[in-house]
Image (cartoon, helix red, strand yellow):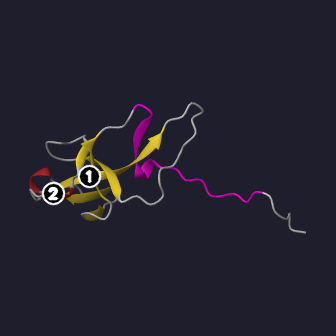
Amino acid sequence: MKINDETINLGYVAVERHQVQKNTLGGLYIPGESVNQYAIGKVTHGEKKGMFCLFPVYSGVKVETKFQTIHLIPINDIIAFVEPDDDETFIALNEVKVRPAEWIGGNSGK
């Protein structure tokens, strides 16, 4: 499925969810707060295409396609357009790699 630019309701903006990643000298990833009431998204269609916006986490409608997940956010729910700080980058949620937890220490099965 593809989203046709001309058919999006004028009251909505199509965004792709992103996450803030802090850059450190050693290349370590420092996760943000585990519970956040706001989300960041990159506008994928329209005149603001390519800009990042801040909006409430539970706002809008989530549309999953074969290749991507798009959120249709009401324009009135956009709080601000944002840019990353010098020590941050915004990465798409589908690019976030989570390694499975490993068991460290404890009994060795004896």
Q: In this view, does 106 lie to the left or right of 101?
A: right
Occupied quadrant, residue 108: bottom right
| Residue 34 percent coordinates (x, y) | 48, 58
> Would residue 5 be visible to someone looking at this image?
yes
| Residue 47 percent coordinates (x, y) | 13, 42
| Residue type marked 2 | Asn
Q: Is residue 57 left or right of residue 12?
A: right
| Location of mark 2 (residue) | 76
Occupied quadrant, residue 77: bottom left
Seen from the viewer's position, the closer of residues 105 and 33 is 33
Checking the image for residue 39, the label placed there is none
| Residue 24 percent coordinates (x, y) | 54, 34
98 falls in the magenta region: yes
Question: Quick check: marks 2 and 1 in contact, CB under 8 Å?
Answer: no
| Location of mark 1 (residue) | 15
Q: What element carries label 1?
A: strand
Q: In this view, does 107 lie above or below 4?
A: below
Q: Which residue is drawn at 54% across and 43% down?
A: 29
Label 1 Cα crowd, 10 Å radius (few <14 / some 14-19 / many 20+): many
Q: Which residue is drawn at 18% across and 42% down?
A: 48
Seen from the viewer's position, the closer of residues 93 and 29 is 29
Magenta stretch: give its range: 86-104
| Residue type marked 1 | Val
Camera-near label (2 vs 1) is 2
